[in-house]
Amino acid sequence: MIDIHSHVLWEIDDGSVSMAMSKNMLQLAWQHGTKSMIFTPHVIEEAYKPSWSLIKEKTQQLEAWLKQELPEMCVYPAAEVQMNWNLLPELAVNGSYCINGGEYMLIELPMKEIPLYADNFWYELELKGIQPILAHPERYMRVMRHKELLLKWRERGLLLQCNAGSLVGYFGKQVQENAKFLLEADMVDFIGSDAHRDNVRTPDMSQAAQLIREMVGEARLHRITVENPNLLLANKPVAIRTPQLNVVKNKKNFWQRMLAKLV
């Protein structure tokens, strides 16, 4: 598996608090089936704003350690960038904050609101040549209450990353239901651990992987944990799947009406 969302880099945001913890997190990930990790520290205006050079430097330090301890494991620099208009000028400058310096970028929304400029923000990213990936849409209650907006974003090419913890109930029942809903509708392109520590919110995605296998099968699990992440790292296009609305129980009519409005 490839974990595309993690807060493993130490003393850089609200994730790992030490290099020793970061090493423990990598070992835990490896033990539970994760072979590669993308490091995505928060980039939030007036909160956490590490430089791209610092992110790459810390990634290289862990990479050097891995060559001695876990030589088969790979790690890559990136960031989880909050949707904020003031950050736009700093994004994608020499690959800054993009996954491995390529064209893909993990974007999170403010938890309690959908910015009024959201559509314009996606457009500005497109102008910069950035392909955005929305981090954990299942956790944004306003987004999940306005599913027509998510469908509209999906239609214009927005990729979606679901948290492993959401699928297994770590963030509560409603978030879990949201995550399963998106998974059943084939709207989940990637999963990530969103790991912050080595004792809670860990990088262990094995339980979520088993749940995905049981719900939608081995082929889908492989696509969202191996095939699509490899395309990110190779800077190649990831296919946007048409939502499978007819397989989502008790939601069929609503989703079909929303999709009909968009097409």
Image: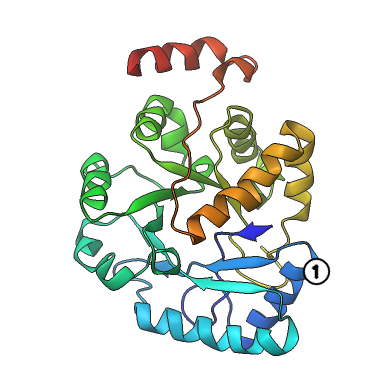
- Residue under the point 67% across and 84% down: 66
Give the percent coordinates (x, y) of residue 104: 40, 56
Q: Residues within 10 Å of mark 1 (few under 14, many from 20)?
A: few
Q: Secondary structure at mark 1?
A: helix
The amino acid type found where label 1 is placed reads Gln
Give the percent coordinates (x, y) of residue 53: 37, 83
Closer to the camera in the image, 126 or 139: 126
Give the percent coordinates (x, y) of residue 61: 55, 88
- Residue under the point 39% across and 46% down: 112
* Vertical comparison of 132 with 239: above or below: below
Closer to the camera in the image, 62 or 113: 62
* Vertical comparison of 117 with 80: above or below: above
- Residue under the point 72% across and 32% down: 216
Q: Quadrant of the N terminus?
A: bottom right
Which colour assignment does the render follow? Answer: rainbow
Judge whether residue 87 can be spotted in this image.
yes
Q: Can you tell which quarter of the image residue 24 is in?
A: bottom right
- Residue under the point 19% across and 65% down: 89
* Vertical comparison of 3 with 212: above or below: below
Residue at which label 1 appears? 31
How many discs appear? Answer: 1
Give the percent coordinates (x, y) of residue 36: 64, 67
Closer to the camera in the image, 138 or 206: 206
Judge whether residue 171 can be spotted in this image.
no
Residue 93 left/right relative to 171: left
Q: Can you tell which quarter of the image residue 173 is in?
A: top right
Q: Can you tell which quarter of the image residue 6 is in?
A: bottom right
Q: Quadrant of the C terminus?
A: top left
